[in-house]
Amino acid sequence: MKVRILGASGGIGVGRYTTSILVNDAVLIDGGDGVGTLTLERMSDIRHLFVTHSHLDHLCHIPLLVDGLFERLSRSSESLMVYGLPETLQAIKDHVFNGTIWPDFGQLPNPQTPVLTYQEMAPGETIDVAGLKIEMVEVNHIVPAAAYLVEEEGRWFAFSGDTGPCSRFWERLNELEQLGLLVVEAAYPNEMAELAGLAKHYCPETLAVDLQTLVHDPDIYITHLKPGFEEEVCAQLDALMPGRRIHRLYGGEFFDV
């Protein structure tokens, strides 16, 4: 399984791109502005998009992605399939592809063969696409949100999406036979724990508590770091969890899981 981190920041700035992960060639997880680092040729291979939740930093480039693929998709009568929780998909329809913010590509070029289609998922459900098995796990964020577990030939990659403390996510990881790569969020340093709690994000102290329950020993990459706090958060995690292999995600990384 090839995993390419297109964007991993909790904000913007020079060299920072928001959340988007490409798995092999055809599957994208989240549509932050990291999508814009792909060539048009590479974008053209994407046919499945799994969205963790409805916040702008995770979906801001979905409209531009569909627009860029419109001619190719309409010419071949293909569609970009967007998966997510019902609440997430409804938010995208109501507030993005609504004919005002952006054209409703769920009806274009015609309602019979649109270039954008939606498929609801439920927590615990697994969908087989492009040779991958992708499972949704509900997590604990300020809006309905999901993590995704991706499996190919017995190898697993897990992405938490945005979440605060969430026992079910870690319980499900412990049920796997192995875990090759874990990408988990930690947005704020410990000094901002109150804000992290209100926004339902991890800080190092809360993430360390949950990481202690993980029976696997994968390389752990920290995502969604808020700009300006990246080094502080990672230093605090290293101090709290010296036995774990914890790394900062910058965006642009390639993994062979």
Image (cartoon, rainbow, N blue to C red):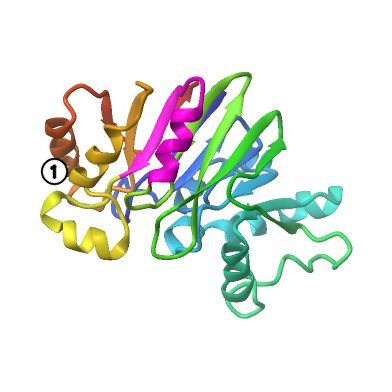
Snapshot quadrant of residue 212: top left
Tell me the magenta residue range. Answer: 167-185
In the image, what residue type sits under mark 1?
Glu
Residue drawn at point x = 37 percent, y = 52 percent: 163
Q: Judge left or right: residue 257 versus residue 100.
A: left
Q: Is residue 176 magenta?
A: yes
Residue 91 in the image: state x and y as whole percent.
57, 70
Residue furthest to the right: 112
Residue 183 in the image: state x and y as whole percent.
39, 36
Snapshot quadrant of residue 42: top right
Instruction: Tell me the residue that label 1 is attached to.
Output: 232
Can I make out residue 160 in this image?
no
Foreground of the two, 24 or 53: 53
Q: Judge left or right: residue 136 versus residue 34.
A: right
Foreground of the two, 202 or 235: 202
The image shows residue 204, relative to residue 90, as above or below, that is: above
Residue 74 in the image: state x and y as whole percent.
81, 55
Can I make out residue 49 in this image?
yes
Number of callouts: 1
Residue drawn at point x = 78 percent, y = 51 percent: 73
Residue drawn at point x = 25 percent, y = 53 percent: 226
If the image is split into quadrants, where does the N terminus sit?
Answer: top right
Foreground of the two, 248 or 37: 248
Crowding at dot 1, Cα within 10 Å, few <14 / some 14-19 / many 20+, comes out as some
Q: Is residue 93 magenta?
A: no
Looking at the rendered structure, the secondary structure element under dot 1 is helix
Residue 219 in the image: state x and y as whole percent.
35, 24
Q: Judge left or right: residue 7 versus residue 101.
A: left
